Image: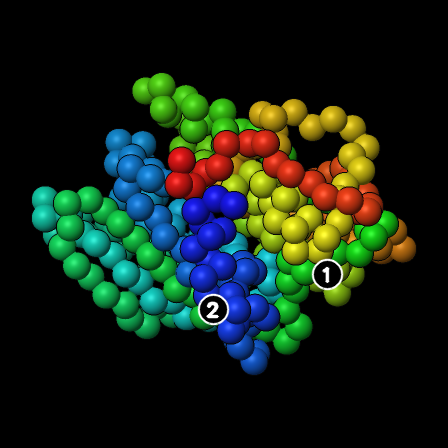
Amino acid sequence: MNKEDYFIKQFKNNHKNVIGDDGAVIGSHVYSMDAFFENIHFKREWMSLKQIARKAMIANISDAIVMNAIPKYALLSVAIPKSFSNEDLKELAKGFKSVAKKFGIKIIGGDTISNNKLDISITIISKTKKPIYRKGLKKDDLLCYSGELGTCKKDLDSLLNGKKVSKKSKFIKPKLKPKFFYEIAPYINCALDISDGLFFELERLSKINSLGFNFFDKISKEVGCSGEEYEVLFSFSQKNKEIISKIATKHEVKLNIFAKAVDGTYKCDCQNHHFK
């Protein structure tokens, strides 16, 4: 058990039906929170302040979407370096506000402190009529992910080696697919976003649903271990394959049906993105 899992387990005994998903469902509300810390999730030289704020918001909104929830409100906690000027703060605020406007979210408060680096934590409050959880995978379900995977790992490797990447890189500017997901939601059994890599998310599904996977074709580590993709991993019954395919075509979303749920377990051998 890694340190992240061990720490989370300390709180699960009394809240096992709430803790452990992309967000916590309380009644018709979903509460999700993500941290985005300098030198852990990004380096200042990689991204503008506006891009940093945008990605911090989008990463958290992704959690709400995959639970079939519509984001409504945001609370921001920002540790601000003493070196920041008023112009820096304006640029950071522009990033938060641009994403909030795009998704119809109201920023309703939060907290700020002084720090020696830029650290951001965001809480998103969402509304749902029928949440979708990580738990719900059924034997013989088809496993699918949206879009293409692998470019974020390549771009991160480039950045770590001092190279520049395109401003359109998904590592810099994740692209969410809310309209597609909300439309397929009635036809799927479980879902989560691919933030830590496909293989790592599959291990999560395997643990919580006590099932393994039969892969149709080999998936390379360059694809399966690529984190921060923010594509959607989901499962569905064979009978819903046609309607989900039609919805994907309508929204111009690429579907990758790559495995079937079977008896067994699955263990990821990628390097953990956290607590290295």
Q: Amino acid at mark 2?
A: Tyr
Task: Specify the quadrant of the image occupied by residue 106.
Answer: bottom left
Packing grade of label 1 (10 A; few <14, some 14-19, many >=20) is some
Q: Is residue 22 above or below residue 220?
A: below
- For this rendering, which residue is in front, 44 or 9? 9
Q: Position of residue 114 (x, y in %)?
A: 13, 55
Q: Which mark is residue 31?
A: 2
Packing grade of label 2 (10 A; few <14, some 14-19, many >=20) is many
Outermost residue on the right side: it is: 239
What colouring does the structure picture have? rainbow
Q: Is residue 7 above or below residue 16?
A: above
Q: Is residue 84 above or below residue 39?
A: below
Task: Specify the quadrant of the image occupied by residue 39.
Answer: top left
**Residue visible at 64% across and 38% down?**
267
Q: CA distance from mark 1 to mark 2?
A: 20 Å
Q: Position of residue 221 (x, y in %)?
A: 61, 26
Quarter occupied by the C terminus: top left
Asked if residue 117 lies left or right of residue 271, the reply is left
Q: Amino acid at mark 1?
A: Gly
Q: Position of residue 208 (x, y in %)?
A: 66, 56
Q: Which mark is residue 136?
A: 1
Sequence-earlier tag: 1 or 2 = 2
**Residue visible at 36% across and 60% down?**
122
Task: Specify the quadrant of the image occupied by residue 223.
Answer: top right
Q: Position of residue 256 (x, y in %)?
A: 73, 38
**Residue visible at 58% across and 41% down?**
200
